[in-house]
Amino acid sequence: MNMHPDDKDDMRRLSVLLPRLIDDQLSDAEGKELVAILQSSPEAQAHYLNYLQIHSELSCAWGVVDSVNPAHLSEDFTTADEKSAASTMPSIPNTWTGTNVNLQGLVAFLVLVIGGLSLVLVLSLSGYLGGSVEQGTTPVVEGAPVVEGDDGPSQPIVASIDTPNATSENAFTKGFDVAMAEPVAAVVVRSEGDSASKLSIGQRLTSGTLKLDQGFVQMEFMSGAVVAIEGPAELQIHSKNAATLLSGSVSANVPPRARGFVLNAPKAAIVDLGTEFGVSVTPAGTSEVEVLSGEVELSLLGDDGNTLISKRVKEATRISVDREQDLLQTITAKPKELPKIIAYEDEALPRTDEYAELIRRDSPLLYWRFEDVDESAVANQLIRNEMGPNHAAILRHGQNGGKNIQLTNGYLRLQRSDSARYLVSEQPISGLNQGPYSIELWMKPDDLQHATVLGVFPESRNDSRIFLNVLEIVTDTFMIHEPGALRFLHRTPPTASYETGTNAFTPGLCVPGQWHHVVAVKNTDAMEIYLNGHLTRRVPLADDNVDGSGDFHLIFGQLAAAPDWRQFSGAIDEIAVYSRALTPAEIEHHFTVVSP
């Protein structure tokens, strides 16, 4: 879908009117002009929805957005395309908290004009922009949207979800893409037990209610928080940053990037301060909080939903929330059993000799396998090319002695580090971009943090932002995509300029702890990205953005050869680069040999 109006005058006016709408500065005449543009253009409507969606998500996650210097929203390194996109985004004032009657009135009127803004977005515009979840407030979505695939619709995104009546569906979602209106909050990474069988690994969860009679479910929120729930239990999912436990028990592990994740319970709110903790709600409705490591800020909420009493709870402490007497009391009795968050197994890719022979027969330029590696080669930091003496790979350990990049179980294992650690080609590939080529690999991410799996950069570059290609897991960027998707970026000629880059995003997301087969293809007139044997996106390339000269290196595990720039954490295996475009049949065959 084209997210920008075709009429350049309309687009120019939207770039002025929408920031004024966000800042509550629209005059009556400007409001009428905005309504007229939206009435006349479906493309303008889609652009309007995306614009408000971005601001809703950014405000929930970050509060006020600095439009002059957005670098604090991401990691230390921000590419030029993201800086360009960020420069068009106005700041969101602190006063926009859902109490501004003029703004809400205009937003509501525009919703009626367009005829389909989702209930989730309306709630985010009115009640959740401050990043907190008010006690007793439950955002619900109409029905459980499905993910379309080659074999038709898959299972509903949420297994058990409270829904409004059919009239609400017509009022809020008619005529619009459900996935655009309902951002993904979490993804299922483990599902065990009879009552959890309706939830499959990789299933995306939006706002809604998850009910388990029995069984076990572990999910990763898009903020990075990992939550385990064991039935019988009931959990309301509000957003990537917040959930409410209504009954049962959950455990949460919150990494630094998800700091501030909020878990509510009856008359209680637990704000993470970098920790692992558990929460239980007894049948009587009493909330108990146990901090396993780190600390949390525990609030006892008053009748108005705001903090009545607040307490910093440290490691190895259990606190009970007494709703009758409005007290936070330390518990000295034996701790209750909490669901255990299960670490991902370091299992090897189940490849066979048949797979290796198949790849060799398809004649890649280079093929790195990471198994049966000569110890002397490892000591010299070299990984040999299965296809010949040239194009070996160099293992760069950085300053940690190799602890965060190593060969194990026949694959390359990477963990995030304060210093650079990566795999890079020893010699450049000459003329790689003079025609079609394909890059194939298997990857198993540890999480959905924004991370670079692969970069292809010119040998002669003098700016670390200059790339021919980037293959990344993308989350929390200024671009429009599903969180946790894969991004294939192509730039001919390689440059740091945003205008020359073309992106292909997968419509689905990758799943932590699972092996994925990924193939990026630059063809004669288009770029393609395949995930697990299937073409997920094909994007045409302009005539001046296809072929080009130059010699190119490959880097795996981070964005550039500098400390902690978008480091990938997880496993990589079976890397192959071809001087031609693999066919869809070849790619599907490669995948099915490993995963029938």
Image: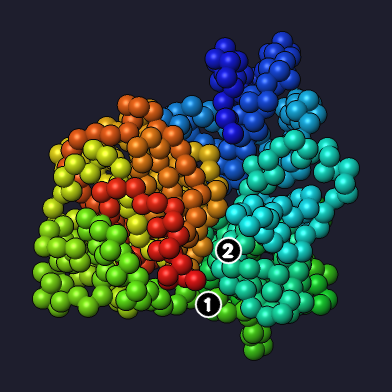
Amino acid of disc 2:
Gly
Mark 2: few/some/many CA within 10 Å (<14, 14-19, 20+): many
Above or below residue 345? Residue 174 is above
Pick the residue in front: 541 or 490: 541
Above or below residue 78? Residue 204 is below
Residue 414 circle label? none
Q: Residue furthest bottom?
A: 334
Please count the marks in the image. Answer: 2
Query: Looking at the picture, how far across and down is residue 210, in whole percent?
Result: 73, 65
Q: Nearer the viewer, mark 1 or mark 2?
A: 2
Which residue is pictured at 16% across the width and 72% down the height?
Answer: 378
For residue 589, say whether it is visible. yes
**Is 397 positioned to the left or the right of 149 in the image?**
left
The quadrant of the picture occupied by the N terminus is top right
Which residue is pictured at 58% across the width and 30% down the height?
Answer: 3
Q: Circle 1 sits on which residue?
A: 342
Which of the 4 image quadrants contains residue 83?
top left
Pick the residue in front: 165 or 258: 165
Query: Looking at the picture, how far across and down is residue 482, in whole percent?
Result: 55, 47
Which residue is pictured at 62% across the width and 74% down the height?
Answer: 191
Pick the residue in front: 214 or 412: 412
Q: Circle 2 sits on which residue?
A: 202
